[in-house]
Image: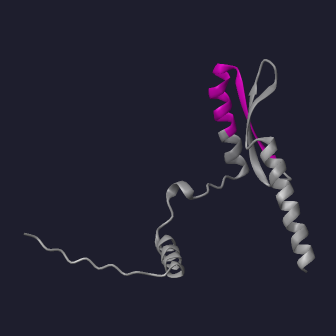
Amino acid sequence: MKIELQKQVVLDPGMQQAHQKVERAQQPPSPQKELIKLNQEELKELSHALSEFLSIFNLEVKLVYHKEAGQIVVQVIDKRTNEVIKQIPPEELLRIAKKIHDFVGLLLEKKA
């Protein structure tokens, strides 16, 4: 017969949330969440390597800096029609991000 002693502490909801936040803060960041920063030369090399690979399928990849969103946009283009097949992030998401950014700016101006 085995008897185990278990300790259980009952915390109120506010304390539970604080405890969870502390536990998350103490966990080391996962490598997947780390951002990779590329300089322009590395970005060009990556774009060229992807373009060479995709040329087999008559596709081309372009990495474009979107000024309004402040981020890099990846476009997959059909070489025959010069049509953008896929864009990451999509144009609609870029428009929404800009509207949110503008709205936050207006809120900050009104507070000041």
From this viewpoint, is residue 66 visible?
Answer: no
Find residue 30 and report its horizontal and vertical position in percent: 49, 59
Q: Quadrant of residue 89?
A: top right
Q: Does 13 lie within the magenta span?
A: no
Across the whole image, how many numbered discs are drawn on residues?
0
From this viewpoint, is residue 31 visible?
Answer: yes
Along the line of sight, which residue is nearer the eye, 7 or 27? Answer: 7
Side of 71 where 13 appears, left or right: left
Q: Which residue is drawn at 61% across and 54% down?
A: 36
Q: Which residue is drawn at 69% across and 38% down?
A: 47
Q: Residue at x 53, y 75 (%)?
A: 17
As drawn, 63 above or below 26: above
Along the line of sight, which residue is nearer the eye, 75 or 1? Answer: 1
Direction left: furthest residue: 1
Find residue 71 and report its horizontal and vertical position in percent: 76, 52
Side of 28 where 76 appears, left or right: right
Direction top: furthest residue: 80
As drawn, 98 above or below 82: below
- Quadrant of the frame with the C terminus: bottom right
Q: Does 62 lie within the magenta span?
A: yes
Side of 102 where 71 appears, left or right: left
Which residues are the magenta region?
Answer: 47-65
State the colouring used for the structure image.
one colour
Q: Residue at x 85, y 55 (%)?
A: 98
Find residue 11 and report its horizontal and vertical position in percent: 44, 81
Along the line of sight, which residue is nearer the eye, 21 or 71? Answer: 21
Q: Quadrant of residue 102?
A: bottom right
Find residue 1 and report its horizontal and vertical position in percent: 7, 69
Q: Quadrant of residue 109?
A: bottom right
